[in-house]
Amino acid sequence: MKLELGYIQIKDIQFSKECKVENGTLYVDPDAVKAFMYEEDDVKDWVADFKFDIAKPGESVRITPVKDVIEPRVKVEGGGGIFPGVVAKVDTVGSGKTHVLRGMAVVTAGKIVGFQEGIIDMSGPGAEYTPFSKLNNFVVVAEPKDGYQDHKHEYERAVRLAGLRAAAFIGEIGRNVTPDETQEFETLGIKEGIEKYPDLPRVAYVHMLQTQGLLHDTYVYGVDAKKTLTTIIYPTETMDGAILSGNCVSACDKNTTYHHLNNPVVAELFAQHGKTLNYVCNIITNENVYLADKQRSSDWSAKLCRLLDLDGAIVSQEGFGNPDTDLIMNTKKIELQGVKTTIITDEYAGQDGKSQSLADADPLADAVVTGGNANEVIILPKMDKVIGMLDYVDVIAGGHAGSLREDGTIEAEIQVITGATNEMGFNRLSAR
Amino acid sequence: MESRSTYLVITNNPLVVKCMPADLAVEYHDVTYREVLVLVRDMVYAGHRLYTHPLSGSVKPNETPYKSIVVSKKPKKMEMDEAFIISSSIETFDKFTPIRRELPERVLKDFRLIDYTLLCGAVGLDAVAGLSNNK
């Protein structure tokens, strides 16, 4: 399967009555975006209104509470459409050509639950912890209809779909734009790959998906991944939005849809493909709460690693606590099949960094990449403008009563910042 | 998946008591999150099977006051891996800095809802349908 990504560099976003990309500026009509979002019945039923704003790198702006971050893309050649099974029909994606509006994102924000977190600061010390401070952000703030308090599942779905629809609408604006740069990604069949790279180690990416319940879910071609068994997916399918985030808790280490589209493990494995390794495929597996599900899913991961004759696997997790058990089960069982593993996680090592980092461990998990300690305390300065609302800052993870101080500064752990300790490694913390 | 009739939900979440189907046994305790973990640890040590992960959800243990865990109704034989999971969950709980704050009712309500939906997701119940019992 082969996919060409065409990157259209977006340097600025302007509201306009006309929708177009010209000289690197995206002109977009918010009313047209809104109309497209409201074509979805769930959105009509549960969202009273959307407010739009633009946040640019370096501005004194805080976006909170963030639900999802999504990169606009459009399929211009090949089967299926962007976000299959949710916005487009459920056809297989991952081949042909896709245009990417690079340097920007759609950010959905607004209240869903009373403890919701997720801060993106566009400048100051907080901006250094989130990759999204470097993007031009088209922010959509959703306002729920009365009565949503007793219909949180329906409202969450409505906001999730609205964000994806906004990104699909904006992606479409790039359909006929000539990309500034193109890049090709190809995954060969098993036999072809062995014949072409007989001497290179065979490596796959075991991608663990957050699958626990409301605000803790991930969708694969529209299917709630907690109801699936471990399976194989072409890496390029993920670049067309086959995996979508329904995860809205633990801002620092949730994988937003932007992360799934731009998975850094996929990018790095493709960069090494044919040089130092043979990148075989992605294995997607879930992180269910039921212990027998964990047993079944991790058994399956290990079976697939063996069946694919892998030499190595990169394993990434998503979330805190419960997924640590899946991470260790996967790693241990894959190692016992004779396949070397490296895991990517983050740490909850206490504010002093002295505690055990994960809720589970095993001697076979001896190669670890960390995204950082989510308990580290940070003071975020007051920003001139808030997009969204600060109502929740006192009750977010890592915040406490008094988190929002009288002078407008916020004292909290870095777990409040969207993407700060991302467990795919898509973050800005580094010891390099 | 084991039959629902073998489950016992240990919880401090009143919403779970209201919304679980009649054929699912629920034991409510008016205790803290940590005390729920300790109750379950003692049951697992006594041979009850641990069916769901004690640290379900990404809501941190010092954030939410609510926790529901499913164990087997009847004690069998202690499983070492399950005993390890519940005891290391208590260690994980203890490393979080306690937060002293009064949570408003609307926030407590959402924490109850999340704990309830995580439980439903774990045992394959329709969370939305169950909420209709919360009258």
Image (spheres, coloured by chain):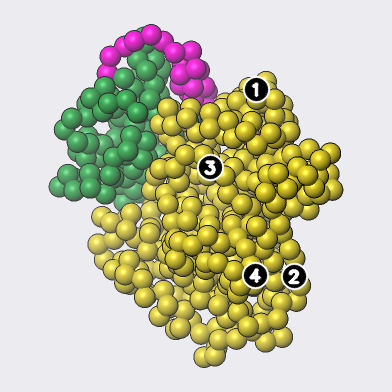
Chain colours: A yellow, B green
Residue pointed to by mark 2: A182
For the residue carrying disc 2, how many other residues have a C-alpha within 10 Å: few (<14), some (14-19), or many (20+)?
A: some
Q: On the image, numbered disc 4 is attached to which residue?
A: A97
Residue A424: x %, y % from top left: 65, 47
Q: Is residue A396 visible?
A: no
Which residue reaches farthest bottom?
A17
Q: CA distance from mark 1 to mark 4?
A: 39 Å
Residue at 48% in and 52% down:
A220
Q: Secondary structure at mark 1?
A: helix
- In-image side of A5 versus A19 (left or right): right
Q: Which residues are magenta?
A: B73-92
Left or right: B101 as drawn, with respect to B123: right
Q: Position of residue A386 (x, y in %)?
A: 53, 68
Question: On residue B20, which mark appears?
Answer: none
Q: Which mark is residue A231?
A: 3
C-alpha span from label 2 to label 4: 10 Å
Disc 1: which residue? A336
Relative image position of residue B80 (x, y in whole percent): 48, 13
Q: Is residue A258 above or below residue A250?
A: below
Label 3 element class: strand
Q: Secondary structure at mark 4?
A: strand
